[in-house]
Image (cartoon, helix red, strand yellow):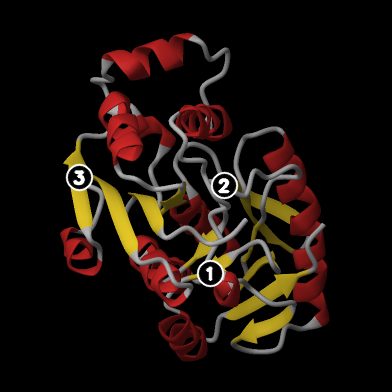
Amino acid sequence: MQNPKTLFLIAGNGFYPRLATLGAREAGVSRIIVAAFEGETDPALAGFVDEIHWMKVGQLGRLIDAARKSGATASLMAGQIAPGNLFDLRPDFHALILLAKLRERNAETLFGAVAGELEKAGVPLLPATTFLEEHLACEGLIAGPKPKTRILDDIAYGLVIAKEVSRLDIGQTVAVKKGTVLAVEGFDGTDATIRRGGELGSGEAVVVKVSKPRQDMRFDVPVIGPKTLETAASAGVTTIAMEAGRTLLLESNRLFELATQHHITLWGTPSS
């Protein structure tokens, strides 16, 4: 698909939306319209885009209306919008109708349903890595110390466990130590998994983060950023492994600095 001249950006929290904006500009996108969420999206993003519409999480009707009126020919979802907060406790009428149609309510079904609504509005959702290919993790050593054989064994083991856990739609991150599972990601998210695994690992925990076996790359793509490294450092985690080509690295320079400073290995596994 040819890069759109006008892009509708659904912006969650963190640095990811700004990075997507910069990438889109470099790719020739001339106009960026943003749907921003109160309490989640960084207000500073307004200085990097052409138009911004603030709304509460759960106002799906307003989001779709803004997308339809934006003049955009494509949309992009960037930044975390936690499934538990997406429709909040006060979903609008549009969201209520959508929720009623879902047999299961998880990240894949919720975001997939939103993608379907955007498609109907004539603003199809692009893969979340669009404009950001240079920020995808590579294979092998990304930063930090070269891993020893035992660490590589734990990475291989953790990869198998994480893939199965993600296939069951439980989570996408696990922490392991010497062939033992320490923590599995649930609704509490990646950082909480890292903290739990680090506490149990006593300075030897290995964290593995993966995409789902049939990952819809339009949303919920694995992301590693400075906050992830800071959490790992405080928890005593030694290694973070991720899938090459399917994991976004945010603020990579800062990421590499933190990995070096805290002696944390960042490792890219071949995408399966």
Please determine whether, in this image, residue 100 is positioned above or below residue 255.
Answer: above
Give the amino acid at mark 1: Leu
Give the amino acid at mark 2: Arg
Q: Earlier in the sequence, mark 1 or mark 2?
A: 1
Residue under label 2, please give it: 218
Residue 132's disc is 1
Residue 109: percent from left, percent from top: 56, 27
* Distance (Cα) linking label 3 and label 1: 23 Å
Residue 152: percent from left, percent from top: 79, 73
Q: Residue at x 49, y 27 (%)?
A: 120
Q: Residue at x 43, y 30 (%)?
A: 121
Give whichever of 194, 27 is nearer the camera. 27
Q: Is residue 165 left or right of residue 81?
A: right
Q: Earlier in the sequence, mark 3 or mark 1?
A: 3
Residue under label 3, please give it: 53
Q: Earlier in the sequence, mark 3 or mark 2?
A: 3
SS label for mark 3: strand
